[in-house]
């Protein structure tokens, strides 16, 4: 039996090696997730699937790199590109040796707001494609992908940078044995994951046993249905009864990631997400439903707001089973706009909503709990790059739901264009209000308005496209978070 | 600090002092513990919340209890000023005196003395900031303009630099006054006080002095490494373990816990293992070095204060710490049994996957610390100088690991290496000036 301090050390060292990548995972060739770093709920479930899909097609070896972003093969948003390579923990091993693990990293590029009826219209979709074979870059493939009219503008530079970082990380992984003083063999990996499962199930043992069921009407034609059951130190999420994709479409991997991420968040434990933890969770997502969509359903809204929608419902139902987990609803993540100045030059922003209040704490302002990167783009750099003024960027006062503890406020940004442009936007206002809990009030939902100089502000629909002229202003408000408990009467 | 200088000067028969170079880490602690002076911040109207919206989130994992790091400025002391500069540096809306008069009255009402000013595009054209600065200085405020401190193109980094300077300003001036008094009372009234900052020796009156000073001691270590022509340097101090690598470029931005700060300093990393790293039950169910530091308040148990064992307690329990001025005389022998009791309790929780005897558990944790530290060394480093007061304490566990990694280590276990580095740098600089 290995010392558990070694598992701790492996986790720490691998985490450090993967530090340059906000989203990355180390997976064994037989599908066991060892370590993952994630930025979004979708990352948790999709990264290992991307690695395994590539391995199934190409038997990835060290010195090979496969590129993939197809959401139906383990990708996420089409603007996020995955690179998969093989790892040998003893770097001195022969170049042709079979991989002991697969390393997948996700490179995020600027997304686009799309209102599409098919994933093919949302961007360039890349199935598993060999980009580097035995250390040699296939420039024809690279040029073909980067030259695609829907490819992100900075893809070429970004991919080259990503390949360099991946090479450095793979080399460091090759020193794992030297760095930790122990080989990470198949047997060790099994033991590691088994211990993780046991420890996670101990945490689950602190939860009340029971079940709860809930639904969300996501559109006039479709609904999200979920039954959660906690028993025998396991949690089951059953989406049977969910409708077909309509506005929202998720892959089953993204749905699984949303369930696991929400469960870990509810436990408030810094859980190392690996296969051991995933074994304690069962997800049933019927094929063809919005939580396990079929190609070619568009995925942009599903992989952004849809994942938050699933996580929000999971948190609500967990709170019904175990009162100590009860929380109000956070605002939804998707409050995105794109101001397109033509010739491939477009500005994209996505405003963070307020966080929900809990029994003992006010929700945080302008903080999307389902994202791990909260970096806002520099206002000065926006104004330098685009004919655009950021008139204001502020916390949206009084937008959080009131209660014994108030929900966090959303944010407000006002943009003024200085050249003709096209505005595209996508906000989640009508689907679900960020509800309060235990008597707390709901928050104000997201809004988008535009204003011509000297005219009144005009509210806009949930999504759409609009021509802008110099001097026009766009006002975007993200939702607040729901309040908790009844506010004391004065 | 003044008292310490007076005592030093009285105990050591000094020849006349012409210059006193101060390397002071105190201000770093002031920032970290949020013990600075309340200050106000004036910014472009409409962006008053921008810094709050950019503060980092404390938790690294998904949680329903996510929150942003504590700020160093009270949000109610941030005021907007109606002005606008274009990205090209053209004034689109000038600063109006009436607005400044109103704001000055407000600031006085709040009893504010230190004011930071950060306006949009001031790195391109600082004129609006200068107008505000002149007006407020005439009104008696101590003003810190972001454009005076850094030409950083990221407004958040520039603005935090101004606020941090304002936050530290009073403490900085008090320290200087104490030192000047001590010098005068000791017969060195003509001595000039200089400050070691992240870019070298500067005048204490330099606009960027308070913030820059927090990197002074690190700059001295960086120069010390350069002078020895060693690739990497690992400094193992009582309060901080720092890593320097000659291949890293100088940095213009510091990632403080409250946000990005524009300040030049030598590249270094505060490694993911510190003397006050807490020892706790990990997710894996065993006792391990956690990700969190306990700090010196209440402090390690070996100093007779804390309740949770720390890495320093392990080193002390195993008898690894020799004579470390300022530390070893504070060890409380009675703490030994308390640390052993705490380890026994942790071992009991850990079950069969870890040693049950406190000493064996301590040895396991010591090894874990060495492995964790060695794993953070730069990938291709083939040689490293290891120094600092705790270097002797870590040597038994770290030496073997480095050998396994093929890294040649040069150990300088002199506990006063930081002082030596500072003195060496100051002497070289003085000589250069002469």
Image (cartoon, coloured by chain):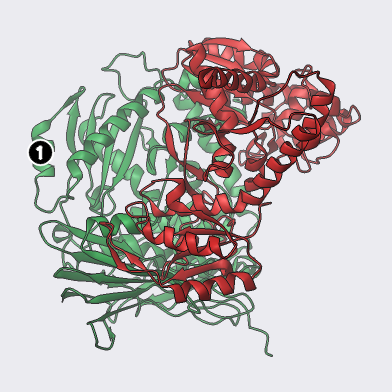
Chain colours: A green, B red
Question: Can the viewer see residue A283?
Answer: yes
Question: Can the viewer see residue A181?
Answer: no
Report whether A62 appears left or right of B201: left
Task: Identify the residue at horizontal 64%, vertical 83% (top origin).
Answer: A487
Report whether B41 appears left or right of A372: right
Instruction: Looking at the picture, tell me which residue is in the foreground, A235 or A259.
Output: A259
Q: Is residue A273 above or below residue A377?
A: above
- The crowding category of the residue bearing disc 1, from other C-alpha atoms within 10 Å (few below 14, some 14 to 19, many at least 20), is few
Report whether A33 appears left or right of A10: left
**Location of residue B318 (image quadrant):** top right
Return the x and y of residue B114 as percentages of the image width and height. 60, 58
Residue with the most extreme bottom position = A490
Q: Secondary structure at mark 1?
A: helix
Task: Identify the residue at horizontal 26%, vertical 71% (top origin).
Answer: A416
Report whether B303 appears left or right of A202: right
The quarter of the rendered structure image containing the N terminus of chain B is: top right
Instruction: Looking at the picture, tell me which residue is in the foreground, B320 or A216.
Output: B320
Return the x and y of residue A96 as percentages of the image width and height. 26, 17
Residue position for label 1: A143
Instruction: Looking at the picture, tell me which residue is in the foreground, B314 or A294.
Output: B314
Return the x and y of residue B361 as percentages of the image width and height. 73, 26
């Amino acid at each position: 039996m290995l010392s558990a301090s070694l598992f701790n050390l492996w986790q720490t060292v691998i985490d450090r090696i993967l530090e340059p990548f906000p989203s990355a995972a180390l997976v064994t060739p037989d599908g066991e997730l060892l370590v993952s770093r994630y930025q979004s709920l979708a990352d948790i479930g999709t990264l290992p699937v991307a690695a395994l899909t590539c391995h199934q097609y190409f038997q990835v070896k060290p010195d090979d790199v496969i590129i993939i972003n197809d959401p139906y093969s383990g990708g996420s948003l089409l603007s996020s590109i995955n690179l998969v390579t093989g790892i040998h923990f003893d770097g001195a091993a022969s170049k042709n040796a079979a991989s002991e693990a697969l390393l997948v990293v996700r490179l995020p590029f600027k997304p686009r707001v799309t209102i599409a009826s098919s994933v093919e219209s949302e961007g360039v979709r890349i199935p598993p494609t060999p980009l580097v074979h035995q250390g040699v870059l296939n420039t024809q493939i690279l040029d073909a992908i980067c030259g695609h009219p829907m490819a992100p503008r900075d893809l070429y530079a970004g991919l080259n940078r990503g390949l360099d970082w991946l090479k450095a990380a793979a080399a460091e992984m090759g020193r794992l044995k030297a760095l930790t003083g122990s080989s990470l063999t198949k047997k060790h990996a099994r033991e590691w994951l088994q211990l993780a499962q046991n420890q996670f199930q101990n945490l689950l043992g602190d939860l009340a046993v029971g079940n709860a069921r809930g639904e969300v009407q996501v559109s006039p034609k479709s609904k999200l249905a979920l039954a959660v059951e906690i028993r025998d130190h396991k949690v089951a999420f059953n989406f049977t009864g969910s409708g077909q994709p309509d506005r929202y479409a998720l892959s089953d991997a993204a749905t699984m990631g949303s369930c696991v991420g929400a469960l870990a968040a509810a436990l408030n434990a810094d859980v190392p997400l690996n296969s051991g933890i995933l074994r304690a969770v069962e997800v049933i997502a019927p094929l063809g439903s919005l939580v396990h969509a079929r190609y070619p359903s568009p995925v942009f809204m599903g992989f952004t707001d849809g994942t938050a929608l699933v996580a929000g419902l999971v948190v609500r139902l967990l709170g019904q089973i175990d009162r100590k987990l009860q929380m109000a609803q956070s605002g939804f993540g998707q409050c995105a706009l794109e101001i397109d100045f033509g010739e491939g030059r477009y500005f994209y922003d996505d405003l963070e909503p307020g966080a929900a209040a809990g029994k003992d704490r006010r929700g945080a302002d302008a903080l999307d709990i389902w994202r791990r990167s909260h970096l806002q783009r520099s206002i000065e750099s926006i104004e330098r790059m685009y004919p655009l003024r950021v008139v204001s960027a502020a916390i949206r006062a009084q937008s959080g739901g009131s209660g014994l503890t108030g929900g966090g406020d959303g944010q407000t940004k006002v943009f003024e264009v200085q050249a003709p442009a096209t505005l595209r936007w996508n906000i989640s206002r009508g689907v679900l209000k960020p509800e309060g809990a235990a008597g707390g009030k709901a928050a104000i939902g997201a809004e988008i308005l535009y204003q011509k100089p000297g005219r009144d502000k005009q509210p806009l629909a949930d999504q759409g496209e609009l021509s802008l002229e110099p001097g026009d202003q766009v006002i975007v408000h993200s939702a607040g978070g729901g309040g908790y408990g009844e506010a004391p009467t004065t | 600090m003044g008292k310490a200088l007076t005592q030093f000067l009285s105990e050591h028969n000094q020849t006349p002092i012409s210059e006193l170079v101060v390397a002071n880490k105190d201000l770093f602690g002031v920032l970290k513990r949020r013990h600075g002076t309340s200050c106000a911040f004036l910014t472009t109207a409409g962006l008053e919340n921008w810094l709050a919206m950019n503060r980092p989130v404390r938790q690294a994992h998904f949680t329903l209890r996510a929150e942003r790091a504590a700020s160093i400025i009270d949000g109610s002391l941030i005021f907007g000023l109606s002005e606008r500069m274009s990205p090209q540096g053209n004034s689109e809306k000038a600063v109006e005196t009436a607005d400044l008069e109103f704001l000055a009255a407000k600031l006085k009402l709040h009893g504010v003395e230190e004011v930071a000013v950060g306006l949009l595009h001031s790195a391109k054209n600082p004129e609006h900031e200068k107008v505000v600065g002149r007006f407020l200085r005439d009104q008696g405020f101590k003003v810190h303009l972001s454009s005076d401190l850094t030409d950083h193109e990221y407004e958040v980094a520039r603005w935090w630099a101004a606020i941090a300077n304002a936050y530290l300003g009073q403490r900085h001036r008090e320290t200087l006054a104490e030192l000047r008094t001590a010098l005068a009372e000791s017969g060195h009234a003509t001595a000039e006080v200089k400050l070691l900052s992240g870019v070298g020796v500067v005048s204490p009156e330099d606009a960027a002095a308070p913030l820059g000073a927090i990197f002074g001691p690190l700059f001295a270590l960086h120069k010390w490494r350069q002078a020895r022509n060693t690739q990497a340097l690992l400094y193992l101090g009582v309060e901080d373990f720092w890593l320097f690598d000659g291949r890293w470029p100088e940095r213009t931005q510091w990632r403080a816990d409250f946000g990005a700060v524009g300040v030049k300093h030598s590249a270094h990393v505060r490694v993911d293992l510190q003397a006050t790293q807490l020892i706790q039950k990990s997710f894996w169910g065993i006792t391990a070095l956690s990700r969190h530091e306990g700090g010196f308040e209440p402090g390690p148990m070996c100093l007779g204060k804390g309740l949770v064992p720390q890495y320093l307690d392990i080193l002390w329990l195993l008898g690894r710490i020799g004579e470390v001025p300022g530390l070893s005389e504070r060890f409380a022998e009675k703490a030994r049994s308390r640390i052993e009791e705490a380890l026994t309790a942790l071992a009991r929780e850990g079950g069969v996957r870890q040693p049950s005897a406190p000493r064996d558990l301590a040895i396991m944790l010591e090894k874990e610390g060495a492995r964790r530290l060695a794993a953070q060394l730069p990938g291709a480093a083939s040689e490293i100088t290891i120094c600092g007061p705790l270097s002797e304490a870590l040597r038994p566990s770290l030496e073997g690991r480095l050998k396994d990694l093929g890294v040649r280590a040069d150990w300088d276990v002199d506990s006063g290496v930081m002082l030596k580095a500072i003195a060496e740098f100051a002497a070289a600089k003085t000589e250069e000036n002469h």
